[in-house]
Image: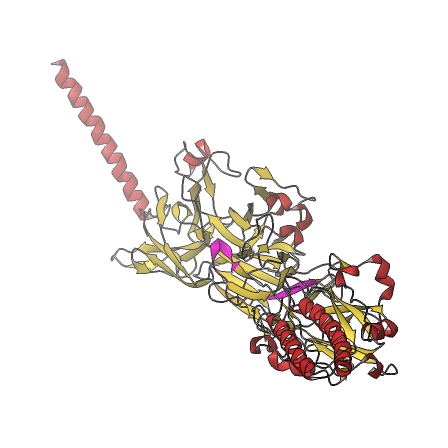
Amino acid sequence: MIPGLWRAMHETIHRYLKKKNEKGNEEREREETSMKKFKKLLAGLLAGAMMLGSMSATAFAAEETNTPKMTAATIDTSLKGSLTIHKYEYNGNSGKTGTGETSDESNVPSDAKEKPLEDAGFTIYKVADVNELTKYYSTDPEALPDVTTYVENGKIKSAYSDKIFGEEVKTNNDGIAEFKALDLGFYVVIETTTPDKVTTPVTPFLVSIPMTTVDGDDWLYDVHVYPKNKTTYGGVTLEKHGKNGAKLEGVTFVLQKKNTAENKWDNVTINESTNKPLGELTTDKNGQITVDGLSQGTYRFIETDRGNNDGYIMDGATAYQFTVNANGTIKYGDNDPKANITITVTNEKPDMTKQVKDRTKETETWKQDADYNVGDMVPYKITVDVPSNITRLKEFTLTDTPTNLKDNIDSVVVKCGETKLTKGTDYTISKDTTDGNGFKVTFNTSEMGDYARKQLVITYNAKLLDSAVTSTDGNTNRAKLEYSNKILPGQDDPDNPNKPENPDTKPGKDYIENTTIVYTFGLQVLKKGEQADGTRTPLEGVQFDLYKEVPEGTAKAITGDAAKAVGLDSNKTWLKINEAPLTTDENGKVSQSGLANGTYYLVETKTNEKYNLLKAPVKVELNIDYVTTTKNEYYKGENGVKTLVKHEVETTTFTENTATSTGTHTETIINKKGFTLPITGGMGTIAITALGVALAFAGVLIIGASRKKTVK
């Protein structure tokens, strides 16, 4: 019950009885008739007030009421009435009885006034016309029907459903719903659309159009009621993770709520509890977005911008959906409802590394730099981290671009663990169109589901070409991974803010570049001849062949007698490096480039006149240390297209025996002159011949004398 209304009724009866004792019988009869009508009026007001004041709906109104002075005869049946509902969000317990007048607004608690309730829908049913109304207010009033006569379980009974008057009216931004031009009579008021934030709708109630003013001096044709609704809100936190659990700051999301009436998603921009703008939903330094003041309903977060988190794939198609229940708990996924939840969202970021094999190690070793001979087949390995959303990427392509090398496209093998991917199904491969020396692997992303969150290893060989440089510039081989940096929604999600206007639109791309470098060195032979006076002069026209030891079975290699014939160990296998003889120039120099570090042998095959050929091959140790310094990996690019640059060479230094080297080793070889024989037919020849004859004769004499001595 409502104390204010009861107190007003009792005070009015007390005043009536006091006056009755002071007046005559005739006048008392008139007063009794008025009192009967007023009791009926109070009953009507009480019924309405009880409805408005109970549980989730309270009418805020003045306390005082006086004896009514109006009668049914004074009702102007030619007029129309109106009902104005002022709807507020209020979770307190205070409130005063409603009078139907606009002055009731002054009794609305201040915190309720700050929260007018929008989109609460009301439907009215005219259950008694003006004739029944006048009977009620007549000198012989009929009993006021109870609201339960017309309503059951919060809905109009089917027998009275045809009594609907007009259409549902929803409260506006100010929480007001107006029913205008109403026929006079009794109306049942039912809240037929309840905002999601409302815990319980207003209990249906009866209202009289018109009703008397609180002092009973006039009829009130425009009735105002001030019901309240209790509300409940939920809150949720989204946490954005990157690779290896990193918290991603600056990622932007949109929050949408399911509009079940129109079967669409609406952007949520207001905190319904505070009525303040949410602002842009961007993750903080902890990777979090926290939103509260959410009324019951179904919501979803959708990512719209990755911020400055370069290299990550913005997933604009996935919706992270959750439900706020009527009691404010949150249901997400298969978890039990909780008061507050955290939705964890992980961004994907592929990776790629490239390495070259170290030929000097017995065990397989891969690194960023190595040295090789021209003509060698250089082994390479590329490792690709496949993102979990690979099947939704429009592009995932690997391009290999060598410099002074030529990739052997037939040697390319793509594996995941021990599983070999199928060319033509999982990927296609083609020559790089730049110069034809590289290749391009295009992955069929729709077939890559089995390899999501796994590593692919691509191995192949490349031949080091004659054009290879021996300087510190080296011979690079760059791999580039090209991938979609956004996942866009399909046309089946028209409310997704990322939906492209053109379904054929391709998202942007990001890149990862990784470079390896192969060094090769040079050998310079300086040939000099030693003169009689000890001076040494360059020898022009001296020829050499350069050999290195190779594995048995190497094409064009020699061994056995062929090796022995040039002074090499016949038990080993040797490969001649040079195709044409290495012939010294006028400065006594000749060079051979494209050599890896190691042991070589120079075999002299021709020397100058008056000089002897070298008795044995000359052993040459090529041992040039190289140190490659690379930059820290960094991103370059703009307009949302970024390239991660890895292992970009910053400086390279060559040293040989602790001294700075240009990458070419110099080997100095000294030749000495042989004995010089006189020209045939000259005097010198005759003298020598005579000397020889004399020596021979002397030898005979000595032998004969020796024999004689023996006989004795």
Please indicate, yes or no, whether residue 689 appears anywhere in the rendered image: yes
Q: Residue at x 69, y 44 (%)?
A: 425
Please indicate, yes or no, whether residue 349 appears anywhere in the rendered image: no
**In the image, residue 446 above or below residue 509:** above
Q: Quadrant of the C terminus?
A: top left
Q: Number of callouts in the render? A: 0
**In the image, residue 556 above or below residue 224:** above
Pinpoint residue 38: horizontal percent, then vertical percent. Answer: 74, 76
Q: Is residue 446 left or right of residue 339?
A: right
**In the image, residue 559 above or below residue 54:** above
Q: Is residue 130 left or right of residue 471?
A: right
Q: Residue at x 67, y 78 (%)?
A: 17
Pinpoint residue 59: horizontal percent, then vertical percent. Answer: 65, 73
Nearest to the observer: residue 17 or residue 427: 17
Q: Residue furthest front?
A: 24
Nearest to the observer: residue 555 or residue 540: 555
Q: Quadrant of residue 54?
A: bottom right
Q: Quadrant of residue 118?
A: bottom right
Pinpoint residue 66: horizontal percent, then vertical percent. Answer: 67, 81
Q: Quadrant of the N terminus?
A: bottom right
Q: Residue furthest top?
A: 711
Nearest to the observer: residue 98 or residue 606: 98
Picture colour scheme: secondary structure
Nearest to the observer: residue 191 or residue 126: 126
Pinpoint residue 539: horizontal percent, then vertical percent. Answer: 38, 56
Q: Residue furthest left?
A: 712
Q: Residue at x 43, y 56 (%)?
A: 590
Q: Give the residues drawn in magenta, as a range.
A: 240-258
Q: Is residue 255 magenta?
A: yes
Q: Is residue 295 magenta?
A: no
Q: Is residue 217 left or right of residue 596?
A: right
